Amino acid sequence: MGKIHQRKIAMINDISGYGRCSLTVAIPILSAMGVQCCPVPTSILSNHTGFPVWFFDDYTDKMGQYLEKWKELKLSFDGIATGFLGSERQIQMVMEAIEEFRTPNTRVMVDPIMGDHGKAYATYTPKLCQEMEKLVRLADVVTPNVTESCILTGRQYKSFGWSRKELVAMAKEIQAMGPDFVVITGVASQPKEDKHQQDSQGSLTNVMLKPDGEVCFQRSKKAGRERPGTGDVFSSIVSGAAVLGWELQDGVKLAAWFVKRCIEKSDELDVPVTNGVCFELVLPELIRRLK
């Protein structure tokens, strides 16, 4: 029997000491999946920016020195995953890191974090969005939400009313940029128009496009209050599943289930919304599912 190779992911993202997002989420979730998470911090925050005040330290000037030591050590990774990037320079450095550390067996996962609810984040200028598109071209798997999908393809955003034909066309346009797999996350149905769900909150659908053109729609009932960090939870599980060799839809299904359970548990315990999701209490359920 051959030796078991433990998978490793270089996770490029910021780290917030409080609020459950970014690397603070990715490290424990990937560890629970049996994947080694090797962090590359892009910035360090005392807490995420959804709080009234925060400390912020831009790590851009140190990222080059940090990654240089990895080059000297000739490290290799089964996966490279990216999260929030705050500047054109950071995106360029990440693209260079992908070129340096990528092997024929490395999976590159890009979560093109640029905006939500129809608006780009304040730091994301049109030029920065163009640079993010260049990074997307290097990805094997890309996981934009609806807003980010619209930014990437130049479409007009709408909160509800997306047809399957429109979503498939948008996913194919993103795939044409370079990624093999496209997952458009969190497509919401308008509650009053949701004929398939009794719950007043409506549902969310994840749209998956595979390299062979096959499209899969995964729909689930929306749960609880919207919270920060759930995108990081979702992309961490999808990234872990990718390097473990899972089928894409299985990773997305697990990620959607886990996010929903985390929201339900957080609402049950009345965790403040700014504190994100108490995923730590749901990790035992995730581990049982993995077994």
Image (spheres, helix red, strand yellow):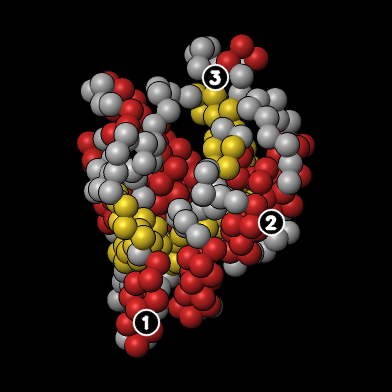
- Label 2 neighbourhood size at 10 Å, few (<14), some (14-19), many (20+)? many
Q: Label 3 belongs to which residue? A: 202
Residue in the picture at 68% in, 30% down = 158
Looking at numbered disc 3 in the image, what kind of residue is underneath it? Gly
Write down the quadrant of residue 77 in the picture.
Answer: bottom left
Q: Looking at numbered disc 2 in the image, what kind of residue is underneath it? A: Gln
Rendered residue at 28%/49% (across/down)? 55
Q: Please, is residue 89 above or below residue 18 in the view?
A: below
Q: CA distance from mark 1 to mark 3?
A: 48 Å
In front: label 2 or label 1: 1
The answer, for residue 109, to whether it is visible in the render is no
Spatial separation of the CA atoms under disc 3 and disc 2: 28 Å
Q: How many numbered discs, if any?
A: 3
Which residue appears at 39% of the width and 76% of the height?
Answer: 64
Nearest the camera: 138 or 34? 138
Question: What residue is shown with label 1?
Answer: 68
Residue 175 numbered mark, or none: 2
Name the amino acid, label 1: Glu
On the image, which quarter does residue 48 sit in?
top left
Of marks 1 and 3, which one's residue comes earlier in the chain?
Answer: 1
Q: Nearer the viewer, residue 71 or 126?
A: 126
Disc 2, disc 1: CB below 8 Å?
no
Instruction: Give the mark toward the camera: 1 or 3.
Output: 1
